[in-house]
Image: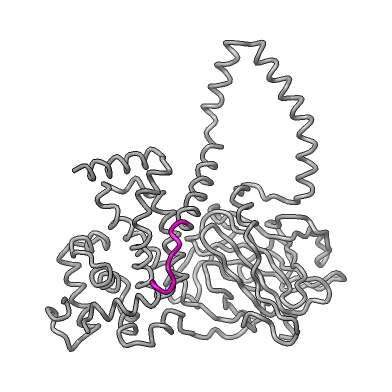
């Protein structure tokens, strides 16, 4: 037995047992390249402008007819698009919708339990930020932190609010600086399977109503989405829980809402271009936790 | 010679935006990249993620690739960097919110602790472990190991010898290199 063969044996245990899907890696990378190219193409309008100016010089009547047709098309199609937009709900500005749709197509694979008493998923913490606890929930590259530790308020509501419709937890997603592109968040009560709702600037998907959070009228959405490539509202300056002393993590605030009858067990699935992460937990009022 | 010319043409086409050329360039590197990541992270899922991220970054950094002949060491270098990032993310696995933070061993640490060589590998510094895996597992010559790690051949050799002494203090270097 040589050192070389020992090293081969210990790594083969992982590499050979779980072979990589080369085609999938290439396909995902190709999708990302396409998305990036799309973003680039939208910002370069020079060639388009050049094409139209050339056409107008050569054939004004045809150009005029095209404009008329375009106007008609706008009237006819615009109404339908508006109706579709209303049915699809909020589409956050600046997010690549193609990539977001790809993320939405991924199935939600949260763990469930038919019986209350123990939340599926193995975590038993509370998402309430209660008196300075700075633990982050998750396995990365996105972590969930309860409360308003880093947030001065998209919605200026502290910790938790209970209304006639449900319960809302102030929360933050803390995102590793290496993450780029659209990030989609969906959530469910992992006992009742009732969908969770998201309030705040990053609500996405279908609007599912409104509520009053301590005097602040908010719109509720079935999803949350943001683009990690753009600057986060806030960044972590550093954390005593981070042995690497990493700073610069993006902080994205929101309110996670659960309907009345919430089992206290929640799960959220966070999908990005190159990762999919599940965070489960136990959300209870701070006085009960 | 024909192969070299074809590779250069492939790189030129990839830089010009050819999807097919880029994938032809990258496809044979996925497997060695994954094997490196498995050695670095000892977690198939994490290794997969690291290679996936590296594949995206490879496209963005295509301009930095000097020649097609250096594609393997270039891509493995990107994978190694992704593995370093992935290890940084592992520190907080399993911590529950609302409770005092507990230090839990990462998955890779738990798996590796099952064997002596695995434990010893896990305790190596990132750069040392990379050199060991590139040399012993991917069977790269020291010149290419140096290229991947961005160091001189002498530095890569010194790093390899130091790592061998940590992995197998009882072995002579010559014996370990067999």
Q: How is the image coloured?
A: one colour
Residue B172, given in percent of the width and then of the height, sits at: 13, 83
In the picture, measured across the screen, residue B82 lies left or right of residue A127, that is: left
Residue B96, by quadrant, is: bottom right
Taking the spot 80% from the left edge, 36% from the top edge, the residue there is A79
Is A142 situated above or below B58?
Answer: below
Could you say where residue B148 lies in the image, as x and y percent from the top left? 27, 61
- Main SS, magenta region, reads loop
Of residues A160 and B157, the one nearer the viewer is B157
Q: Quadrant of residue B74?
A: bottom left
Position of B17 with respect to A261 (left or right) is left
A203 w.r.t. B86: above or below: above
Q: Could you tell me which quadrant the N terminus of chain B lies in?
A: top left
Q: Is residue A21 above or below residue A126?
A: above
Position of the C terminus of chain B, as image quadrant, is bottom left
| Res. A29 visible in picture | yes
Determine if the magenta segment contains residue A217: no
> Which residue extends farthest right?
A164
Locate residue A147, reporting x and y percent. Answer: 67, 72
Q: Quadrant of residue A196?
A: bottom right
From the viewer's side, name the closer residue of A281 and B54: B54
Q: In the rendered structure, does residue A18 fall within the stretch colored magenta?
A: yes
Q: In the rendered picture of this protein, how many numbered marks are placed on residues?
A: 0
Residue at image coords 52%, 86%:
B102
Q: Left or right: A167 with respect to A226? A: right
Q: Is residue A98 above or below residue A282?
A: above
Give the residue at x 42% y 67%: B85
Region rendered in magenta: A15-23
Residue A69 location, x and y as percent?
73, 22
Q: Is residue A245 visible?
A: no
Q: Residue at x 66, y 66 (%)?
A: A108
Q: Is residue B52 left or right of residue A73?
A: left
């Amino acid at each position: 037995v040589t050192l070389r063969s020992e090293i081969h044996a210990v790594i083969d245990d992982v590499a050979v047992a779980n072979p990589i899907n080369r085609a999938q890696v290439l396909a995902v990378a190709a999708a990302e390249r396409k998305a990036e190219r799309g973003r680039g193409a939208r910002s370069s309008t020079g060639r388009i402008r050049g094409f139209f100016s050339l056409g107008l010089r050569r054939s004004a009547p045809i150009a005029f007819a095209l404009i008329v047709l375009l106007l008609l098309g706008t009237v006819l199609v615009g109404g339908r698009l508006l109706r579709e937009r209303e049915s699809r709900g909020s589409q956050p500005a600046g997010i690549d919708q193609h990539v977001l749709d790809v993320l939405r197509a991924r199935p939600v694979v949260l763990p469930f339990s038919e019986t209350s008493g123990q939340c599926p998923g193995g975590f038993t913490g509370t998402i309430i930020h209660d008196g300075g606890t700075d633990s982050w929930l998750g396995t990365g590259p996105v972590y969930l932190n309860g409360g308003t530790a880093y947030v001065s308020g998209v919605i200026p509501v502290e910790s938790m609010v209970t209304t006639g419709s449900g319960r809302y937890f102030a929360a933050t997603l803390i995102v590793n600086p290496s993450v780029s592109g659209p990030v989609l968040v969906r959530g469910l009560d992992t006992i009742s399977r009732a969908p969770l709702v998201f309030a705040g600037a990053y609500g996405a998907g279908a609007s599912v109503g409104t509520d009053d959070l301590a005097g602040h009228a908010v719109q509720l959405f079935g999803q949350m989405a943001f683009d990690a490539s753009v600057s986060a509202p806030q960044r972590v300056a550093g954390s005593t829980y981070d042995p690497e002393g990493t700073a610069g993590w993006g902080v994205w605030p929101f309110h996670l809402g659960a309907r009345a009858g919430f089992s206290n067990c929640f799960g959220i699935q966070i999908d990005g271009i190159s990762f999919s992460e599940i965070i489960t937990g136990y959300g209870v009022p701070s006085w009960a936790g | 010679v024909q192969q070299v010319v074809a590779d250069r043409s492939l790189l030129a086409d990839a830089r010009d935006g050819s999807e097919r050329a880029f994938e032809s360039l990258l496809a044979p590197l996925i497997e060695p990249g994954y094997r490196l990541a498995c050695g670095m992270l000892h977690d198939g899922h994490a290794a997969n993620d690291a290679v996936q991220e590296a594949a995206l970054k490879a496209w963005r950094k295509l301009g930095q690739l000097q020649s097609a002949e250096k594609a393997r060491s270039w891509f493995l270098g990107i994978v190694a960097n992704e593995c370093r990032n992935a290890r940084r993310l592992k520190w907080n696995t399993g911590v529950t919110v609302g409770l005092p933070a507990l230090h839990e061993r990462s998955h890779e640490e738990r798996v590796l602790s099952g064997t002596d060589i695995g434990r010893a590998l896990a305790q190596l510094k990132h750069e040392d472990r990379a050199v060991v895996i590139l040399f012993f597992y991917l069977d790269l010559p020291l010149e290419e190991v140096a290229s991947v790690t961005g160091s001189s051949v002498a530095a890569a050799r010194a790093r390899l010898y130091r790592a061998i002494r940590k992995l197998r203090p009882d072995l002579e270097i010559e014996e370990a290199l067999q």
